[in-house]
Image: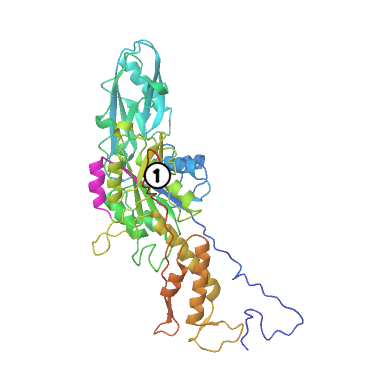
Amino acid sequence: MASFIQSINSGYKLPLINIEVDPSQAGTPVQNLEALLVGYMLSTGTAQPNKPVACGSISNAKTLFGEGSMLARMFEMYFAVDQGTPIICLPVSEPSAGVAATGSVTFAGPAAQPGTLNLYIAGQKVSVAVGLGDTAAQLATKAVAALSAAPSLPVTAAVDGTTTSKVNLTARHKGIALNEIRVEDSILGINGGETVPAGVTITYPTGNVLSGGTGVPDWSTPIGALNDDPYEWTAMPFTDTGSLQAWDTEFGFTDAGRWGWIRQTYGQIFQARKDTYQGHFTWGQLQNSGVISTMEDELASPTPSWELAAIYTADAAKSLGNDPGLPLQFLPLTGHIPAPRDQRFSRTELNGLAHVGLAIKDVRAGVSTIMREQTQYQKSVTGRPDNAYELVTTLSTLATIFRRLIQAVEQTYGRCKLADDGTRIKPGARITTPALVKAFLCALYDLMEDDGLVENSDAFAANLVVQRAADADTLEVYFPPDIINGLRRFNVRAGFRLQFQS
C-alpha cells in the first residue's frame, strides 16, 4: 500500500508514536503585496541611488532621498492616502548630462498697503509678509527668504545678480520632468483670503511654469536592481518615450516581462501626465501598454504629475489590495489641487481621452476623484482595436486568480505522481490523473467565484481542458476564467408623466 508518510524513516525502530507536521494544506490564500515609488533623489539623501529601499515614514523619506526631492514628496503624498501597504522606494539619480529647469519672478512696487502675498510653487504655499511701502527689491528679498525657509519645495531661489527685483528659480533636479513646475499666487482667491496686496504686481515665467530642463533617466541599472521581487503597484512619474518603453518591457507580457510565464510576478504601473486636450489625445494614440495606466491632468493644475502619480497609486493599492475587481471610480485623489474651473477638461473631452488610453478624473465638491482607471491598451498585436486589457481591474483580478492557482497547485501537487485516467489509485497515494486535476480546478474556481473574482462556473467547467502532454511528466491545462466585471454605467430611461392616468 502506498504510504502518505513523508519524513519518518521506515527503518526507525524506537516505540511508539512519531508525528510529522505537515503545513502544506493549512495555508489560506494570501498576497503579500508591495507598492514601489520611483523618482529622483537629491545628493543630500543617504540612500544609495538606483537601489530599492524600504521606507516607512515621511521623516525617513526626507533623510533617505533629501528634503525637497521628487521621491520624498511622492512618498509624502502616497503616505497621506495609504499607510497599510508596505512601501519600497527606488531612488534614481538625475541625468548627469541634463539641465535643470529655470524661471524667474519679477516684482514691482511699492506696496500701497501691508498684507500677505501667498506664492505657490508646485502647489505648495509660501507666505510672504508685505509691509507698507515695500519696494520691488525688498519684495524680492523677502520672497527669497520665505522660499528658502521651505525646504520641501522642488526649487531653489536667489535674487538676480543684475535686476534686484527679480527672483531666479532653479529646479532641484535636472531633467525634462521638472519643466512643469508651476509658479503662481493666490490659488484660493479672495474667498480663501488670498489676494495680492495693493500696489504689488508680479510677472511670472511664460505659462507660469519653469522651462529649459533637459535629460531623462537611464533605466538600465535601476530596473535591473529590482530583480524578480514582486511590486504590485508602481508609481513611475516619467512619461518620456524611453522611460515608457523600459518599464513596459519590464512589466509586460513577453517571456522576459513580469507578466510572462517565466517570472510570473505581475504588477502594474501608475503615472500622471500634464498637457492640453489636443496634446493628450495625440500622445495617447501613440501608446498601447496594458500594464501602464496614465492619469490625465490639466496644465493649470498646481500639483506636479509625480505627486498625482503617487496619489493615484496609493488609491489603487488601498482599494485593489482589498478587492482587486472593485472599480476605482469616485475614489478621492487626496492632495491633488484641481485646475481652475474654466481650465478643466469637459466631460466630452474626458470621454475622448479615455478612448485613447488615458485614465480620467473628475472634480466633485472641489475634490478630484477618479472617473475611470483606464490603461494605455487600445490595440491587439495585429493592430486591431481591442479592449482586453483596457482596465486596471482586469489585470489586478487576473493576478489574484493566478496567484491563487499557483498556491493551490503547489500545495496539492507539489510532490506528486501522474497517471492516466482510469488508473487504480489506493487511498493516500500521492498520484493524480487529468480527471482528478480537472475536478480540483473546478472546485478551486467555485471558491474564487464565492470570493467575487470570477463568474459562470458552469461555463468554466465546460471549457476547462486538462490533458497529459507528449512529455508524460507534464499536464497541459486550458484555464478559461470569466473574471468578474465592475458596475461602471447605470443607464436609465426616465419615462416621465405629468399625471398618471387612473
Asked if the magenta segment contains residue 243, the reply would be no
Quadrant of residue 485 in the image?
Answer: bottom left
Please say if 276 is above or below 394: above
Q: Which quadrant would the C terminus be assigned to in this image?
A: top left
Give the crowd class for mark 1: few <14, some 14-19, many >=20 residues within 10 Å: many
What percent of the width, then of the height, locates residue 276? Answer: 25, 40
Q: Is residue 97 left or right of residue 250?
A: left
Q: Is residue 301 left or right of residue 385?
A: right
Please tell me which residue is depicted at 40% across the width and 42% down the height of the picture.
501
In this picture the colour scheme is: rainbow
Q: Which residues are magenta?
A: 272-287
Q: Quickly name the residue at label 1.
A: 370
Quadrant of residue 187 in the image?
Answer: top left
Asked if the magenta segment contains residue 277, the reply would be yes
Quadrant of residue 189 in the image?
Answer: top left
Q: Say which of 46 and 10 sits in front.
A: 10
Q: What amino acid type is highlighted by mark number 1?
A: Ile
What percent of the width, then of the height, locates residue 110? Answer: 31, 12
Q: Furthest residue to the right?
A: 15
What percent of the width, then of the height, locates residue 299? Answer: 29, 37
Does residue 42 show up? Answer: no
Does residue 240 show up? Answer: yes
